[in-house]
Amino acid sequence: MATSTTSESVDERLTTVGLLFESAAGLRRLFSRQLEDAGANTQQSFDILIRLARSEGTELRMSELAAQASLTPSGLTRAVDRLQDQGLVARRTCPEDRRGSFAQLTPAGRQLMADAIPVHVAQIDRVLDEVFTPAEEAEFSAMLRRLRDYTLERNASSGCPGLEESAPTCAEV
Amino acid sequence: MATSTTSESVDERLTTVGLLFESAAGLRRLFSRQLEDAGANTQQSFDILIRLARSEGTELRMSELAAQASLTPSGLTRAVDRLQDQGLVARRTCPEDRRGSFAQLTPAGRQLMADAIPVHVAQIDRVLDEVFTPAEEAEFSAMLRRLRDYTLERNASSGCPGLEESAPTCAEV
DNA sequence: GAAAGGTAGTTGCGAGGGCAAATACCAGTG
DNA sequence: CACTGGTATTTGCCCTCGCAACTACCTTTC
């Protein structure tokens, strides 16, 4: 088959990793349809909004949010800028540490999420119900968590700022 | 905790999906380090190159490659442009259908992959060995495949062009 | 309490990728 | 064969994101 270096087990493992990427991309694509006309312009926006919606006080520190959303600080800054322009999010300076700031859902943002999350959840339900048994789903989730934690640990040294493997926080879409 | 709509099972399933995205992003980040100084500029480039390397004749139709790499036709066109500028890939017009073309590894591209794939595979081995037992790995892979095929099927209608759930081809990175 | 060093966040810049329109080509009809 | 409709790929335009440099602020040290 292949011209260059491949053995059987090599192929299998490459395929596993490839499937992971394809699954993630496929789900993103699948969800993006409903999300985008639900009012959140992109999946990434929705990802940020939902993490805020699920956090204490519907707000998070910028750096925490960046880590959760798999964005760099710079990427998050602009993403929050856009959401702020849309009136869905506001910035609040942290009183204890005036370098930092919180991103917080506005009332409009909370309303949007109150409407959009059920739709999104219904879509996830449909996928998981059709693809997995409950037992499989639980195991799938557990395996993903181990994998995620492993990458967090390994990426910690130079990768995401201010984020160790410690806090599994609220993972999300 | 959250201010808006959340029940327990909702949280779990949102988390599962979130973990999938975080795992994929985490692995990309983890791999990107070694890949980029291996000669493939980005993970996406490497993704394309490895899929070509693992295909019959080290070539694929543009549309097929786009689907496998989770890119739109337009995105793939530019990605192949870049690889062509680097001398790693060449385009070959399809003789039977002169609208279409193949992207094919050049000798330099094949050489690069012959060097880089073992390194990449070693990295994948390390991750999978540390995170999963062999049995878990097999099940993980099977579950991902079902999920991937489900998204392919559901996205087929409007999403990726020229791509049904038919050919699982060689999944990758 | 002034200096040195670290941390949170933002900005300039450039690369990558999507959507829609355009191009080139095949395929079925009359 | 001309015509209409569909498919493969490319191009124009724009948005998003990462990196590196910068600012503002905290914190430790002397």
Image (tube, coloured by chain):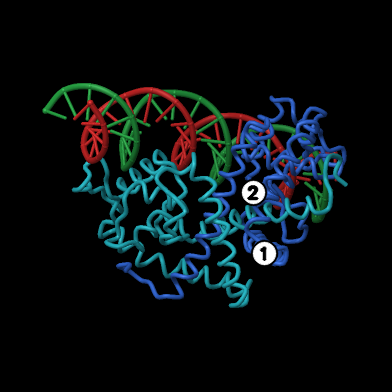
Chain colours: A cyan, B blue, C green, D red
Q: Position of residue D21 (x, y in %)?
A: 38, 23
The residue lying at 60 percent from left, 77 percent from top is A135
Residue B160 lies left or right of residue A105; in this view the side is right
Q: Residue at x 39, y 57 (%)?
A: A39
Q: In front: B46, or A135?
A: A135
Label disc, if present, on residue B64 of the rendered structure: none
Identify the residue shown where x is 70% and y is 56%: A16
Would residue A42 be seen by someone viewing this image from the given angle? no
Image x and y of residue B119, in percent: 72, 40
Residue that label 1 marks: B140
Q: Residue at x 34, y 67 (%)?
A: A114
Amino acid at the residue labelled 2: Ser
Residue A87 appears at what percent x and percent y?
28, 51
Q: Is residue B72 above or below residue B103?
A: below
Asked if residue A94 is positioned above or below residue A173 in the image, the reply reads above
10 Å crowding of disc 2: few (<14), some (14-19), many (20+): many
Identify the residue under disc 2.
Answer: B70
Amino acid type, label 1: Phe
Q: Secondary structure at mark 1?
A: helix
Mark 1 or 2: the one toward you: 1
Front residue of A38 and C3: C3
Can you see residue A148?
yes
Report the chain holding disc 1.
B
Please tell me how crowded label 1 is: few (under 14), some (14-19), or many (20+) other residues with Cα within 10 Å.
Answer: many
Chain that bears disc 2? B
Q: Please name whichever residue, A86 or C11, is drawn nearer the observer in this view of the structure.
A: C11
Cα distance in 3D space between marks 1 and 2: 21 Å
